[in-house]
């Protein structure tokens, strides 16, 4: 995510080289069989100019690639780590296929990088049961320093969430078993900071599948690790 901006510029430069080559081939293809001396001079000058432009662009691509490699070696970016734990359900009420309930869990956001700090400007968290969203909330923005694990308390409310008859029956069966599996999705607008440089906003999407939430507070909820979606 951090290096994608430089990589995009390299791809654009490479595409421009291909465009110049196609123009050069097109011009050669449409030259007359017996051009005049003046036309030969013009064609040769045009060809030399295209070669110089192509060489300059190739040099720029090399320099951009070298810069990306140097930055990667210096920063050594590591994947961010997310997990969910201490999940519980309270105030559960399911009648006439409409759900009201409170969901509480802890989000652990880990930044293992030595040189990168992260700004979380917006954080949206949603809960879904069998691909149907049943609760949603927005968390407070925060700044995460290097080599840090930040714990976020998430409290989501399902308020008169409409369910199908089949989902209602499945959810009642899980209620009887004392625990329910839900998917947690996190969507955040983040920025990276390295020394004095700050990146543009990036959209971070995290999926935490099959998070186990307990109906009884005496039960110890298991920890679920999450995946960062591309």
Image: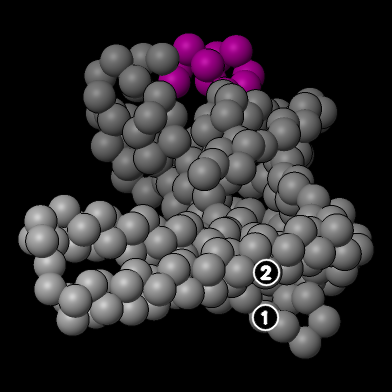
Q: In this view, does 223 lie above or below 146?
A: above
For the rendered model, the colour scheme is one colour
Badge 1, how many Cα within 10 Å: few under 14, some, many 20+? some
State the count of labels.
Answer: 2
Q: Is 173 part of what is drawn in magenta?
A: yes
At a point 27% along the width and 37% down the height, the residue shown is 162
Residue found at the very far bottom of the displayed protein: 196
At a point 39% along the width and 77% down the height, the residue shown is 49
Q: In this view, does 122 lie to the left or right of 116?
A: left
Q: For mark 2, what is the residue?
A: 63
Point out residue 221 in the picture as x, y percentages from the top left corner: 76, 29
Mark 2 and mark 1: Cα distance apart in space: 21 Å
**Residue 198: which numbered mark, if any?**
1
Quadrant for the N terminus, please: bottom right
Q: Which of marks 2 and 1 is nearer the N terminus?
A: 2
Identify the element where label 1 is drawn. Answer: strand
Q: Can residue 11 be seen in this view?
A: yes
Q: Nearer the viewer, residue 92 or 201?
A: 201
Of marks 2 and 1, the one in the foreground: 2
Q: In this view, does 148 lie above or below 184?
A: below
Quarter of the figure with residue 71: bottom right
Point out residue 199 in the picture as x, y percentages from the top left corner: 62, 75
At a point 67% along the width and 80% down the height, the residue shown is 198
Q: In this view, does 117 lie to the left or right of 207?
A: right
Instruction: Give the magenta-colored segment's residue range.
Output: 171-180
Point out residue 213 in the picture as x, y percentages from the top left corner: 64, 31
At a point 73% along the width and 76% down the height, the residue shown is 193
């Amino acid at each position: 995510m951090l290096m994608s901006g430089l990589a995009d510029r390299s791809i654009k430069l490479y595409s421009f080289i291909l465009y110049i080559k196609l123009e050069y081939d097109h011009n050669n293809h449409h030259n007359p069989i017996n051009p005049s001396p003046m036309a030969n001079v013009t064609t040769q000058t045009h060809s030399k100019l295209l070669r110089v432009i192509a060489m300059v662009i190739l040099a720029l691509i090399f320099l951009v690639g070298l810069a990306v490699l140097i930055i990667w070696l210096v920063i050594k970016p590591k994947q961010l780590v997310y997990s969910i734990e201490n999940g519980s359900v309270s105030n559960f009420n399911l009648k006439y296929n409409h759900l009201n309930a409170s969901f509480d869990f802890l989000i652990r956001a880990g930044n293992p990088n030595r040189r990168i700090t992260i700004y979380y400007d917006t954080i949206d968290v949603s809960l879904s049961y069998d691909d149907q969203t049943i609760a949603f909330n927005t968390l407070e923005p925060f700044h995460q320093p290097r080599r840090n694990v930040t714990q976020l308390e998430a409290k989501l409310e399902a308020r008169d969430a409409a369910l199908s008859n089949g989902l209602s029956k499945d959810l009642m069966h899980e209620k009887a078993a004392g625990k329910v599996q839900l998917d947690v999705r996190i969507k955040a607008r983040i920025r990276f900071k390295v020394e004095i440089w700050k990146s543009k906003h990036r959209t971070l999407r995290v999926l935490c599948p099959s998070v186990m939430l307990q109906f009884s507070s005496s039960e110890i909820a298991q920890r679920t690790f999450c995946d960062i979606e591309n």
